[in-house]
Image (tube, rainbow, N blue to C red):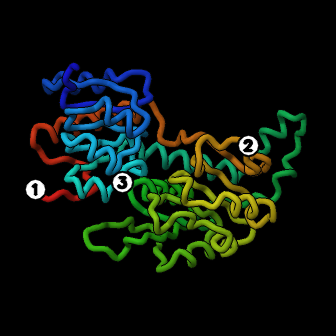
Amino acid sequence: MEQNPKILICDCDHKDVEIERSVFEAAGCDFKWLHCHTEDEVIAQCQGAVCFLNQYAPMNEKVFRGVPSLKMIVRYGVGVDNVNLADATKYGIQVCNVPDYGMNEVADQALALMLGIVRKSYMLSNRVREGVWNYVESIPVHRLSTLTVGVVGTGRIGSQFAKRVKALGCKVIGFDTGYHSDGRTFPADIEFRETLDEVLAESDVISLHCSLSAENQGMMDAAAFAKMKDGSYFVNVSRGGLVNEKALNDALDSGKLAGAAIDVVAKEPLGDSPLLRHPNMIVTPHAAWYSEEAAAELKHKCAEEAVRFLKGKPVHYPVNHIEA
């Protein structure tokens, strides 16, 4: 059996890996592009690899035991939901992501979605296509500068989104679980609140920009939506698992929410969901990260991170801490 190179793209659904190839060749590193979907396929096909570039294939103790040569995983993207970080740390495997490749794109998408539901342009456009020319159906629409926008999670993307809505004249308030942590800086133009409940109660628009964890899974449930203002709006471009979709649907059904817009759902693709019945609901297919420039940046940074690790240099985007 042919021996694998030290770097494997163990799974990637992109049309090609020419950008990665250019980085690896410039560094004098061999690699192979595989299409593994399961733990068993990874174990069977990836023996001898030191670095994985990984998109969706599950990474856990079974894989780490089965591929003992593995020392590093670079995830194509920001989230590492498919990687068991505790298992990786236990087995001494460095996990990295690329947290900054699409932050402007995601912030732009959040802004576009917010404007689409607040100005009701999406709903009105669909009505025009149905032969109805009547702006009165959008009533009420409020001036953007009168709105308070609540940003939940103020990392790279949340901060960029806050900057955009602040430029429109909106009041921006925020909540971040790490607000009082040492070593982090926060935008001065966001008025921070001590609790999520305060942000929910004060905001005309809530926009989620959180990573997903066991602690915040389903955080936007019926109780959370009940705390929002009557007639407010909800935007999520972060992780679908943060939202109880039944509760979101109920909030739209009851009129508690005047509109919602999401780019992510708990299980993708969305399928035949009752959320799609609502004319004041925008759903995009996990597209917020995308631009041609962002896609190229992601591929470059994944490959460069693997090269750094393999050559014994400090990695730029560690997700877990591995003792030297």
- Of marks 3 and 1, which one's residue comes earlier in the chain? 3
- Where residue 257 appears, as percent x and y from the top left, is 73, 63
Which SS class for mark 3?
Answer: loop
Quarter of the image for residue 22 reads top left
Question: 138 or 305, which is in the foreground?
Answer: 305
Q: Quadrant of the C terminus?
A: bottom left
Dot 2 corresponds to which residue?
272
The answer for how far apart the CA atoms under marks 2 and 1 are is 49 Å
Look at mark 3 in the image and give the residue it sits on: 84
Q: Is residue 203 above or below residue 28?
A: below
Residue positioned 54% across, 51% down in the render: 237
Identify the residue shown where x is 68% and y is 70%: 222
Position in image of residue 154 (x %, y %): 43, 63
In the image, is 209 to the left or to the right of 139?
left
User: Which part of the image, by quadrant, shows the N terminus?
Assistant: top left
Q: Nearer the viewer, residue 46 or 126?
A: 46
Q: Residue at x 39, y 43 (%)?
A: 77
Query: Which percent across, then down, holds residue 261?
Result: 65, 51
Q: Nearer the viewer, mark 3 or mark 1?
A: 3
Where disc 1 sits, the SS reads loop
Q: Position of residue 218 (x, y in %)?
A: 57, 64
Q: Amino acid at mark 3?
A: Asn
Q: Quickly name the residue at label 1.
A: 324
Residue 124 in sight in this render: yes
Marks 3/1: CA distance? 20 Å
**Given the image, on which type of amino acid does mark 1 rest?**
Ala
Q: Amino acid at mark 2?
A: Asp
Label 2–label 1 contact, CB within 8 A: no
